[in-house]
Image (tube, rainbow, N blue to C red):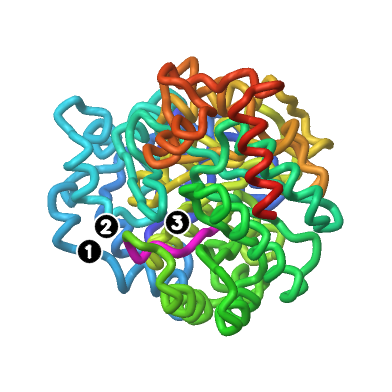
Amino acid sequence: MTVYRTDIAGTRYQFDTLGALLAKASPARSGDQLAGVAAESDIERMAARFVLADLPLSVFTEELVIPYEDDEVTRLIVDTFDETAFKPISSLTVGEFREWLLSNETSPEKIRAVAPAITPEMAAAVCKLMRNQDLIAVAKKCPVVKTFRTTVGLPGHLSVRLQPNHPTDDPEGIAASMLDGLLLASGDAMIGINPASDNVTRAGELLDLIERARLSLNIPTQSCVLTHITNTIELVEKKAPVDLAFQSIAGTEAANKGFGIDLSILKEGREATLSLNRNPTSDSVMYFETGQGAELSADAHHGIDQQTLEARCYAVARAFDPFLVNTVVGFIGPEYLYDGKQIIRAGLEDHFCGKLMGVPMGVDVCYTNHAEADQDDMDVLITLLGTAGVNFVMGVPGADDIMLNYQSTSFHDALYVREVLGLRPAPEFDEWLANVGLMGLDGRVPDVIGSGAARALIGRYADGA
């Protein structure tokens, strides 16, 4: 195993493994400090970045941060590596790869061609050398477009997951939140409910609730109840209207076991959902959620930094052709991302790495109530992500999820980003909004209080429900 060394101002810095080098090169964050893998000083961090910049990308095909025999995620990464796609960048160092990505000569098509060969560790490595503006500029060059009943990820568009959660799964409360979001142009990514319980029967009832609303109003969207994938398999067997199969995923086999899954279960869930033939346009039927720190919280991080492990999640996701992937960036808490600055950086990192690897990334721009962050920080992050071409963000009534007890982004936040950046909803949803009178040609929603279109939609919604 290679030992990495450099001398700075008469001091020698040594990094005993590739994993240690990646960890020491990471921007400062509380999770890596908690794990004991972070750089001990800014000088050590820069020393690690100097070494990393000169490291050939080919090293990542030879040295593994977690042994092949110990981890099925590592085996997935190695076994699916595309040597042909790697050839255009195989001679580059990590620093040269950064320059290649930022070059005006490197088109979205060129990045898309090499994406199957970009391992998560390569993505994480180049990410650690980038400023925030670099992450934004390159991510914008990496659109990942997916289709279901709507087309999500097109340049110039921003979609929203309508998240109408309720602390007791009350159908009337959920219905009211759904209607609120629809009237404010949210829901084109999907309507997705986090159930308060893990009861399969209740999950089926919530799917039926969304399905009735979708059909009665002829809404071009997708539905998902975020229950465990084994529950979704059971729902499919009962012929429930499952559009998207959900699962939280992690970047190591041991952490995934903590979620009660492995790669074979994900495959079974995808095949079950495909059997319903509800996606009229593609085989993208999976919805995954991730978040930096999940592996550490499960004591399954193998001494690897949380940003590198997060990138490994995208290798898992990529293998199952997802419709949506969502990094719930500040949800785990300040133990992993301490404040607004760390949350903003992590959100840009996750979006960049996922898009670079060819994954359709959305971001839940969020924080917990005990983090050193506030809604101003989230305003900054959602604006940066909109500029970077994020596929979707969350739409939560008032930005305050009353079931999960965390702060996210509201329907109005999505409207703000669309307006200031000139973005539109997914084309199919955009057309629906115009047809029912909820959005003008200028992309603005009308004053829904007293709006004839709103009253008509509410009436149809009530009849369908």
Specify the quadrant that holds the N terminus.
bottom left
Find the distance from the CA under tag 3 to the CA under tag 2: 12 Å
- What is the three-letter code of the residue carrying label 3? Tyr
Q: Secondary structure at mark 1?
A: loop
Q: Position of residue 192 (x, y in %)?
A: 62, 53
- Closer to the camera in the image, 72 or 442: 442
Find the distance from the CA under tag 1 to the CA under tag 2: 6 Å
Q: Secondary structure at mark 2?
A: helix
Residue depicted at x 71% and y 22%: 449
- What is the three-letter code of the residue carrying label 2? Pro
Residue assigned mark 1: 82
Q: In this image, 160 relative to 279: left or right?
A: right
> Is residue 20 something that shows in the picture?
no
Please report whichever mark, 3 or 2, sits nearer to the chain's N-terminal start: 2
Q: Which residues are magenta?
A: 282-288
- What is the three-letter code of the residue carrying label 1? Asp
Find the distance from the CA under tag 3 to the CA under tag 1: 16 Å
Residue depicted at x 50% and y 46%: 189
Residue assigned mark 3: 314
- Indicate whether residue 53 is drawn in magenta: no
Question: Contact (CB < 8 A) between labels 1 and 2?
Answer: yes
Residue assigned mark 2: 116
Characterize the local packing of mark 3: few (<14), some (14-19) or many (20 or more) Cα atoms within 10 angstroms: many
> Is residue 408 something that shows in the picture?
yes
Q: How many marks?
A: 3
